[in-house]
Image (cartoon, rainbow, N blue to C red):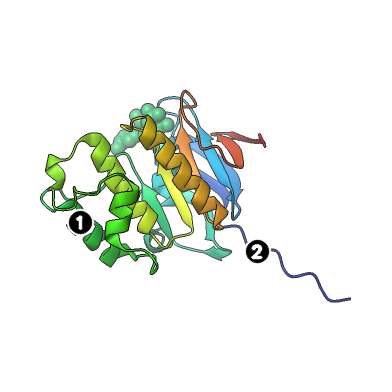
Amino acid sequence: MPDAPPAAAPLLDVRGLCFARDEMPLFGPLDFSVQPGEALLVQGGNGAGKTTLLRVLAGLLDGGNGEVRLAGVPVAAAARAGHLAYLGHLPGLKADLTARENLDYLCGLLGRRPTLDLDPALAIVGLAGFDEAPVRHLSAGQRRRLALARLWLSPAPLWLLDEPYANLDLPGIELVNRMVRAHLDAGGGALVTTHGAYAAPPVRTRLLSLGHQEAVA
Ligand SMILES: Nc1ncnc2c1ncn2[C@@H]1O[C@H](COP(=O)(O)OP(=O)(O)OP(=O)(O)O)[C@@H](O)[C@H]1O
């Protein structure tokens, strides 16, 4: 009988991840993984460490101890940006560049799905017609939508989404949910932080409350 094919490595596998600030432990040790097709919801109150966790995972913040594997391979913090897509509180856009120039710049820096172009991505997030607008003229929600266009263009299978619903109207919340669902259907995975007080993606989701993890679906 032929051997069963090896199981795919998790998109993200975290072992013994701890973080302390000024020698005060904030979280950990944490052990969790994200499989292809799965979202992990990171919950906790204000100041619990959700943003810190995502920034440590994205390699934007030093000081985390433990092992982080991406698709089965240990990846040092400094090398992680090219392997995942991070959507933070601040959209990471350049205010003086136009919406389209920002996408062009970020895709040049971080890569782009070859099957997708910038204009369709702008249209998907509801920014058709805003391509030549400088980002400083966009509202907070429009900037968040532009950051979502960048996310949609990213070739990275793992998304780290910090409060992705912030500043979005109801259609924007539904847009995030559609994007997450499509990304997971295509074999991607996501970590999504939320206070739990409002929207969460309607997808196969496990829950990570900082300090303990439980299956909810
Ligand atoms: N740059 C910083 N310097 C010092 N302490 C910080 C810094 N950033 C965050 N903290 C502290 O670290 C803790 C965790 O902050 P973090 O932003 O990760 O929490 P959070 O769970 O994302 O909170 P919220 O739900 O309010 O966004 C908080 O006590 C915060 O005050």
* Image-based side of 134 in relation to 77, left or right: left
Residue 196 in the image: above or below residue 161:
above
Q: Taking the image as four quarters, which one is ligand 1 found in?
A: top left
Image quadrant holding the N terminus, namely bottom right
Toward which corner of the image does residue 141 lie, by quadrant? top left
Identify the disc placed on residue 100.
1
- To which residue does mark 2 refer? 8
Residue 172 in the image: above or below residue 35:
above
Asked whether residue 164 appears in the rendered view, the answer is yes
Toward which corner of the image does residue 176 lie, by quadrant? top left
Q: Disc 2 marks which amino acid?
A: Ala
Image quadrant holding the C terminus, namely top right
Give the class, few, some or many, for how many residues have Cα within 10 Å of label 2's Cα (few <14, many ≥20).
Answer: few
Position in image of residue 144 (x %, y %): 29, 41
Residue 24 in the image: above or below residue 104:
above
* Image-based side of 138 in relation to 37, left or right: left
Residue at 54% x, 57% y: name it. Answer: 186
Count of labels in the image: 2
Residue at 47% x, 23% y: name it. Answer: 197
Position in image of residue 211 (x %, y %): 57, 34
**Viewer-nearest of discs 1 and 2:** 1
